[in-house]
Amino acid sequence: MTSEPLSPLQLSLPAGEGRRVLVTGATGYVGGRLIQELLAAGFTVRATARNVEDLSQRPWAGSVETAQADLQDDEQVRAAMQDVHTVLYLVHSMGSGKDFMEREAAMARTVAQAAAEAGVHQIVFLGGLHPDKPLEELSDHMRSREQVSRILLAGEVPALVFEAGVVIGSGSVSFEMIRHLAERLPVMPGPSWLTNSIEPIAIRDVLYYLAHACALQESVNRTFDIGCGQEQSFATMLKEYADVAGLSPRKVYALPIPAQRLSGFWIGVVTPIPRGIAMPLSASMAEDAVSEEHDIADLIPDPPEGLTGFREACRRAIERQRSGTVDQTWDDDVLATMALDPAEPLPSDPEWAGNTVFTDVREHDGEASPEAVWQVVESIGGQNGWYSAPVLWRIRGLMDQVMGGYGLARGRRDARRLRVNDHVDWWRVEKIEPGRSVTLRAEMRVGGRAWLQFSVEGRDGGGSRLRQRAVFFPSGLVGRAYWRAIQPFHALVFPTMAKNIMAAAAPQPSGERPGAR
């Protein structure tokens, strides 16, 4: 039953030769990791995205078919499903606005209808574990997941629905929440849901089930619970993570109040998860999430090595993060959701004519080579810091988190390399010319649209020049007031930043980078 070569996670995979599978949500956390497993199993993979350019820098980009498809566009979805055997439905809109439930339902209907018209044999959907109670009593997030499940199960094409609890893996939103809470708070008072029963599942087991669901001989139309087989409380998970990570023992106290909105705010400030996601996430945590059956074993046997327990899942996730091999993160799901209303790119300079625009331009020359300067520029942010006034950056980051933004807590995917759409603290890589320039688009709370650009060029006679440019398009009086208020910050930060970046690129006797955090 196992195919060669082994998967990136060394999973036991089915034989996928001869079947084409369509992965929706290919730019997301689960979809992006699953594609590598499907390719290892021998499936022909077609990946969808609203903009196929978003797939171009993925490690599997050259090995898959691509299809541009907005799941709200009937024609695009039908075209993407031609000659497809199995459709993997791995999208969600949590945190994308108050109407996300209506949007998810509409997308599910579009996919179900298009699959029927295209002759698809099987739809596979990853939903969420939730208690058995009326739909209207579930949290908005869980209600939407259940609503999508019912729409797909009622369609003409059989739907295999997996219901999973918190997914533990390097870069998953659940793991990042647990990691940041446990690492930053030795003593944690929290809401009453900290004692609720939860059954986690390792990302490797989720991928195992999804891959095998694509190779079934007969179509299936029903829901299956999946988990690790061991229920525990969220408080216990925080303590066990600390133990696995080698931290001092954590003390967790569940207060006798639900405090869902307060806990969402708490998560948004302490972790890199923005409040728009933390709120629905904390609301869903207020419900038990434990599997009630393990019938999936009759259809897909447990992995040969057995299901992965929480501690082992944490150990693997920590090891992967420390090795710097995290290709996909929960933030990829946020980016896919944001594509419903994509941010506009930085206009070219001639297009500024007639518009209000504020800029702050700094240049600094140095003796370091352009290659050395670029290496520092490409590694800016995250643990490396911003090379100037770290206290001011932290204050601004905390202000952003309080307002519901990312702040500095999100960090980077890779400490040394950048690619388009990577996050760098509260910035997003919009454009990059390796070795020459990078444009970062702000995702912090500001009264307008903002970018930060770095460009590096060689100088005649040796050395290099670093050009640093901040660009801001204000939105009304609020935006203008914001720019005026932030100018003292720029005056303190930007000149020092350019200078310290150049100094960091020069050979240092101590081997340290001056000006970093």
Image (cartoon, rainbow, N blue to C red):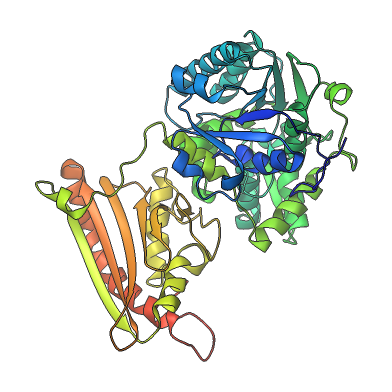
Answer with left or right where residue 345 lies relative to residue 226: left
Placement of 158 over or under 393, stated as above or below = above
Residue 476, given in percent of the width and then of the height, sits at 17, 41
Residue at (78% x, 44% y) in the render: 310
Foreground of the two, 439 or 479: 439
Answer with left or right where residue 461 lies relative to residue 31: left
Placement of 255 over or under 398, stated as above or below = above
Residue 500, given in percent of the width and then of the height, sits at 38, 78
Answer with left or right where residue 187 lies relative to residue 94: right
Total numbered badges shown on the rendered structure:
0
Answer with left or right where residue 222 lies relative to residue 472: right
Foreground of the two, 248 or 127: 127
Among the 4 quarters of the image, the one containing residue 260: top right
Foreground of the two, 145 or 264: 145
Residue 493, given in percent of the width and then of the height, sits at 31, 69
Residue at (63% x, 49% y) in the render: 188
Placement of 74 over or under 461, stated as above or below = above
Examine the rendering and report whether any part of residue 225 can be seen.
yes
Residue extending furthest toward the bottom? 509
Examine the rendering and report whether any part of residue 484 can be seen.
no
Residue at (66% x, 33% y) in the render: 193
Residue at (56% x, 20% y) in the render: 144
Residue extending furthest toward the left? 354
Residue 143, given in percent of the width and then of the height, sits at 58, 19
Quadrant of the snapshot with the N terminus:
top right
